[in-house]
Amino acid sequence: IDSEISESDSSISSPQFYLTDAAGALVETPWIGAESSLSFGHFLTAEQASLTGTSSDPNNPDTDGDGLLDGIEVIFTTWNSTDSVWTLNPLVPNQGGYDSDGDGVGDLVELNLTSNLPINGETYPLGVPTFGDEAREIDNLAFENRVFRILFSKEGRADLGMDQYLEWKSGMPAKPMLQAIFGITDPKDPDTDRDGMVDGYEYWFSEWDLEENKWTMNPLTDTDVDFDSDEDSFDCNGDGEISDSESFDNLAEFDSRWYGKRLEVGNVPNGTTAVSYGRDTVNALMEEEGLSNSAAWDRLYSIFSTKSLKSSEKMGLINLEDPNNFNRSLIGISDPTDSDSDGDGMPDGWEYCYSVYSEILPVNSLRWSLNPLNPLDVDYDPDADGWLDRDILDTPAIQGVWEDRSFSPFSADQQFGKGANSLYFTNIMEYRNGTGPLNPDSDSDSVMMSPVIVNGVVVDYRQDMSLSDGREIFKYGTNPLDNDTDGDMMPDFYEFHRGWNETNDNWSSFLKIQVQWIEVTPQNWKPIQFSDGQITRPQLDWTWFTHDATDPSDATQDADNDGEWDCSGGVCDYIPYNNFQEYYAVVNATLSSPSIVRASALFDCSGEDVEEWWQLRETLLGTCTGSNTAASNYLRINRIHDEDMLYALIIDDNDVSYQDVNSSNDVTMVNGAWTDEFNRIAGDRFHLPNIGLGEYAYGWWILDIDGDMVADGTDPTNWDTDGDWLNDFFEIDDDLLDGIRGNSGSPIRYDDRTS
């Protein structure tokens, strides 16, 4: 009753006081949480008072006839300081149009969920259970605990309700007030089920899953946090399973509002703090499009609400009672009912998968690398794998698509012209090409290592990222998802190292490398010159040398003409030692081309058919995991012990004549028995390199492209890789005379021709 007309005690009114039982006596107890001294009755109009009286009716459970029990309105009311009213009033009907806990759903809606389905724009089949019924069926104990928690949290003001609860727990039928709260969400608790998602988020974005036969989200049970309502999660590591860390589930989509990607909050650059996806989007709009803070938030709202007709209609329902409801309670969430919340063409789960907070190109500001709310992130290049050092004279590769190692070019209007501007390999490009936006080298073929040489000494050894994803597409025309683009069983990094001509922007060079063979006696051809009784090295002619990572036909080319002659049939036929054979340092006819190898009965270390370059390489060199390669790896560079003959030795002996040996002016280029100065632990060069401790063989980088201390074949531009006057084919063929590889000559070990 209004305190001013109270006939008992004008200082005692409801809801400021409530009754508690103290040793059998009812004691008027002040409500500490009351923020006003005005009673419920103060707000009665004369018209309402004439209809229902000036106080609550002890014989009518719903004095004002608004559908809410008086006891419900008493214990769930809150003082609204803005409008200076009680949000729920048992004397005034339809007073509950407030959202006391700010969770995005009104008090009246929350208190009527025991018997009502959500009105959120979705349609449901007949017989769908209410949130409360489903939650009770899922976990009855959790249901009982939730009801108890709702009553207990009312600071003693739900004393009669607690009595009803205890009676019900003892086996008696539930009374009306208790029944009324069985299926409600608590309008004084933004997260009734304590699952980390506010009730309004779960209410407005819940759908009935016809396949799973359940609510995709339910504000009364925490079993829905791991459910992915819109099925937009992405298998980041490609193992065929969606792990917990990969799942962009309901909770992760809600966390966007507060954390961005919660799993990455602790991995931000020193001195910085991660921001939410919403704040990040606003920052991007302000810095990149020049919007004000308020205009940027308005744009974020517009992006979310206009991405589809369904989103627009749902937003209308959310803001029906309060046009600012979404902005106040939910803005910054990712849409759990739409797989592309910002409409940028990249699925939310894919963006979440590769979302890290760092300084991002080309904006050079702190951003989430991928943000399901930020449509501007399509143009970011977080792994900096584009063509960033482009020159005005550079000719871009023809753009197109690789499929089954066959290339289909795009139309002329999709090609790049010459220009000096950087070509960023952006997030949307990564998504469309299937590459990793946080991995600059998706096919792991940027394994080349380049020495930094100062005054003839290696002072550093750096990874060469020439074959980053963007450069493969923009500059070289190779496939960033295949480390052997053309399928010729020679990896892209090897063909790039051997064949790329930076001057001409192509894969061919005009070199003076072609051996001119001499028939010294009938049917006896040698790679030499012979005049005036002197045997000298062969004459070399100019020829085109090609190693094209996009064209398999170069595998069988032999530009340096360093093969052999077969004169066994009465007519001499030249047998090439082609590019393919040079990479593996083999001369067997059964290993002379990729097609022949694939048609043979070769098996890799796992017993699988040899189809790819790495399978053939480990099979030939015996480098299977756990294998002892000391006696089998004929391309090993470092010497293991003094009797070991499988090591590399390249010498420029500067001898003019084959007959005259002068070792005084020999220049050692590579020596696997010496230790290079770079990374040398101790001592001088004249000790065997300790590879396990990080030491390198002297001059290793001349033969070793990728830093694994194994030569990458023989040199296809040099007829005599090791400089010992014997062409590469001959040394390999001679070594195989007894059927054993590695116990005689070697094309990468200089042999003293006096022995």
Image: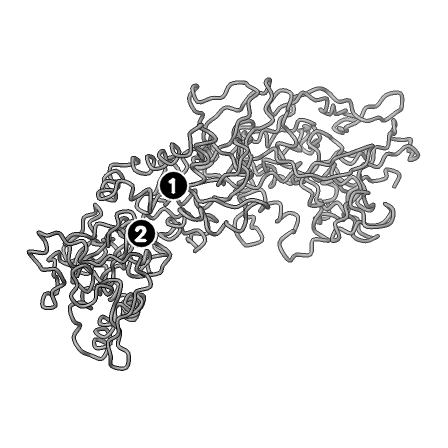
Q: Report the side of 342 relative to 133 (left or right).
A: right
71, 483: nearer the viewer? 71
Q: Secondary structure at mark 1?
A: loop
User: Dot 2 corresponds to which residue?
Assistant: 103
Q: Report the side of 632 relative to 385 (left or right).
A: right
Between marks 1 and 2, how big is the CA–CA gap?
27 Å
User: Dot 1 corresponds to which residue?
Assistant: 347
Position of residue 61 measured from the top left corner of the image (x, y, whole percent): 12, 65
Position of residue 710 measured from the top left corner of the image (x, y, whole percent): 70, 44
4, 325: nearer the viewer? 4
- Residue at the far left in the pictured view: 51
Give the position of the N terminus as an image quadrant: bottom left
Identity of the residue drawn at 26% across and 59% down: 185
366, 647: nearer the viewer? 366
Q: Amino acid at mark 1?
A: Pro
Q: Are marks 1 and 2 in contact (CB under 8 Å)?
A: no
Q: Amino acid at mark 2?
A: Asp
Q: Secondary structure at mark 2?
A: loop
Report the mark closest to the observer, 1 or 2.
Answer: 2
Identity of the residue drawn at 21% across and 49% down: 97
Position of residue 134 measured from the top left corner of the image (x, y, whole percent): 23, 62
Tell me if mark 1 has few (under 14), some (14-19) or many (20+) residues whose alpha carbon lies within 10 angstroms of its own. Answer: many
630, 186: nearer the viewer? 186
